[in-house]
Image: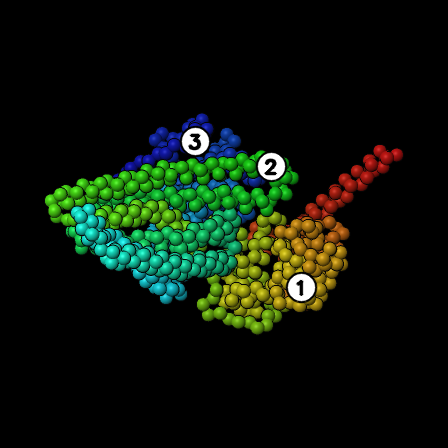
Amino acid sequence: MNIPLPPPLAISFPDAWHDSVLPHLSDNEAIVAWLEINLDARLNFSQELLLISDRRLLCFSGGQAQVFPFHAGLTMDCHDHGGIGRIELFEGEVRLACWFYTLAHNVQAMRFIKQFEQQLSCHLTGIAVTEAAPELCPDCLTPMELSVCPQCNSTINAPPRIWTLLRLWRFAKSYQWQLISGFLLMLASTAATLVPPYLTMPLMDKVLIPYQNGQPIDFVVVSWLLSGLLGSALLAWSLGWAKTYILALVSERIGADLRTITYEHLLRLSLEYFGGKRTGDLMSRIGSESDRICVFLSLHLLDFATDVLMILMTAAILFSINPYLALVTLVPLPFIAWMIHNVRDRLRTGFEKIDRVWSEVSNVLADTIPGIRVVKAFAQEGREAERFRVANHHNLQVNDRINKIWSLFTPSVSFLTEIGLLVVWAFGIWQVSNNQITVGVLTAFLAYISRFYARLDSMSRIVSVTQKAAAGAKRIFDILDHVSSVPEPVNPVHLNKIEGRIELKDAGFRYGNRAVIKGLNLTIKPGEMIGLVGHSGSGKSTLVNLMCRFYDVSEGAISIDGVNIRSLPVSEYRRHIGLVLQDPFLFFGSIAENIAYGKPDASRADIVAAAHAAHAHEFILRLPHGYDSLVGERGHGLSGGERQRISIARALLIDPRILILDEATASVDTETEKEIQKALDNLVHGRTTIAIAHRLSTLHKADRLVVLDKGEIVEIGSHDELMASEGAYYRLYQAQARNVDSELDDLTSRVAVDRKVSA
């Protein structure tokens, strides 16, 4: 007996498609999933709609409808490359249809395929789908729970905890003896400050009150009591100075260690981490957050510890003097504790939000100031000012919300302590009137209770700074807890000498959810020059990044001289690689310092020799101070060709066995390119070289050319061999030649017109 399946839960789809879809639906046919895609078969932007019903797959495009009924052998898959995704529908080995989309729709496409598989299985087996396809996180493609990604949310959005501050002990452990000394001094200093109120009892009861009753003053007793007050004040001052100085020194060193260790860890992280972070945010974490923690440790934590000791010691003294009066002083404590408990969580999340919003302000500055030339070139000063104004206003709004909470909390604590003091006055006067205590006892009690409530009020105020410090510590530990995706090997292999043989075996790599390199196999001989060519997005720069181990392959392996590069210490391996980029980066400093960046101990003779080989010596000598001339930030003040030749000299100086040239001459004029090419000829001699070049004519000296397309090798051979085969390289070369001829024709036409005008 066949039991009919319950009808699936129908869902709505975009209203714009109703007129196209509804006429094609059968009676009682329910739509269970839909996907809008935005590219046609020619990769032009268009709108298409894919629908999954309880019985078939439908596609609507340009007023036309395609229908694919569910049946055995039907499968669906998706692929992506170079920013383009592709959904394919198969029946066995035969492809029935293919649809394209930009990667903004990739997560929805993966979810759509999951729903297709579930509905097809339901149709074929007669077993209803018991649960919907999980929603996927757009960042890590992890199934989300209640619209929250458990992986991202646990690491990024977890609220800061006070216990995070305890993790700072790893930085304080090396200063434990100084901390113990500071604590003992704090204990002694606090005890010394509690002596004066205790001496007021005999001063009142044995000197002043008897004097009012007609007895003479005993100046010996008075001198002893006043000496005790002076001595306790001097002792408290000296001990307080010593403990403040020692603990301040320790906290500054803890803050310095925190900054240093965080920065060193940051430098060890892979490029993948920096790709998802803003410069201003990282600068804010290492700078302002560590300063905030340092201030908390040196000032607020010290005050908090003093307050705790003062309260405990004061409470002990109060109970020793009069237990009943001491109990009355504790009346405000439950109310203050209740307020702190309610406000704490709101302050904790609020202060972390303030940190994130402030990093937005820093990000605007970090974007605009280095790029000020572009800002001015496109007259976007007003736009950048508006960006800063918006970020600053957002920061102001978040601070205002926190200040509303904090402005109510602090006066409320002060009010409760005043009420407590009033209750003590009333109860104390009642006890004096009943001869249960003396006036001197009440006076000393009030002196102690004033200090008790002052410390209690001070402790309540530390809630704010503690939550700020906890938020800052969490943001720093977010960096320290991040594990590099390019880890150091557990059992490293050391190669004293590298020949330069590079092998890639089934190498694959993905940027997030986008496949860039797929199943790549290549062997490069020692001393061989390889040229990487292909369209933009074909994977050339990614392949170079993998060889430098800026990223690790997702599949397969890369080896150097037969050893997997993952087995080599990262810094040791990279010392054998010279890298010349399309846009060379120069640091603020002298020309000589920039050339010697990879080998700081190089002699001046070695630096000059490298500059000679890079054809940079002549223009360096024309600078005001020669090799000691200062280079502005990012090489400001030098032309693109001059920066490139300094970059080549920097690579020459370390004498690498493997050389990477990433579009080294792409952004310079023809005359400068000739100078750079001469320098490159000196650089590549005797080294394994991998060169990427936009101008194919610059690779004429390469031993082999490797043609990449969509992350795969499609051709390998010399220039003549690839031209003879008339394949992908031939088409690239011809297309580039036509562009050059077109540019020459345009130039000739403009010259001819100029001559006619001049005539």
- Confirm whether residue 667 shows in the render: yes
Residue hosting label 2 = 380
Total labels drawn? 3
Q: For the residues carrying marks 3 and 2, which lies nearer the camera in this image?
A: 2
Residue at image position (63%, 56%) is 589
Label 3 Cα crowd, 10 Å radius (few <14 / some 14-19 / many 20+): few
Disc 3 marks which residue? 14
Q: Left or right: where does residue 97 sit relative to residue 736? A: left
Q: Position of residue 143 (x, y in %)?
A: 38, 47
The reply to whether the C-beta atoms of the residues labelled 3 and 2 are less than 8 Å apart is no
Task: Please state if 132 lies on the left or on the right of 729 as rendered.
Answer: left
In the picture, which quadrant includes the N terminus? top left
How many angstroms separate mark 3 from mark 2 (CA)? 38 Å
Q: What amino acid is at disc 2? A: Gln
Q: Which residue is mark 1?
A: 652
Q: From where the camera sits, is residue 277 visible?
A: no
The mark that comes first in sequence, 1 or 2, is 2
Residue 527 is marked as none
**Residue depth check, mark 1 versus mark 3: number of the one nearer the observer:** 1
Above or below, 39 against 229 in this view is above
Left or right of 499 in this view: 485: left
Image quadrant where residue 225 sits: bottom left
Residue appearing at x 71%, y 62% in the figure? 611
Q: Earlier in the sequence, mark 1 or mark 3?
A: 3
The residue closer to the viewer here, 68 or 535, is 535
Q: Residue at x 64, y 63 (%)?
A: 596
Q: x and y percent of residue 122 in the render?
A: 34, 43
Mark 2 secondary-structure assignment: loop
Which amino acid, mark 1? Leu
Q: CA distance from mark 1 to mark 3?
A: 60 Å
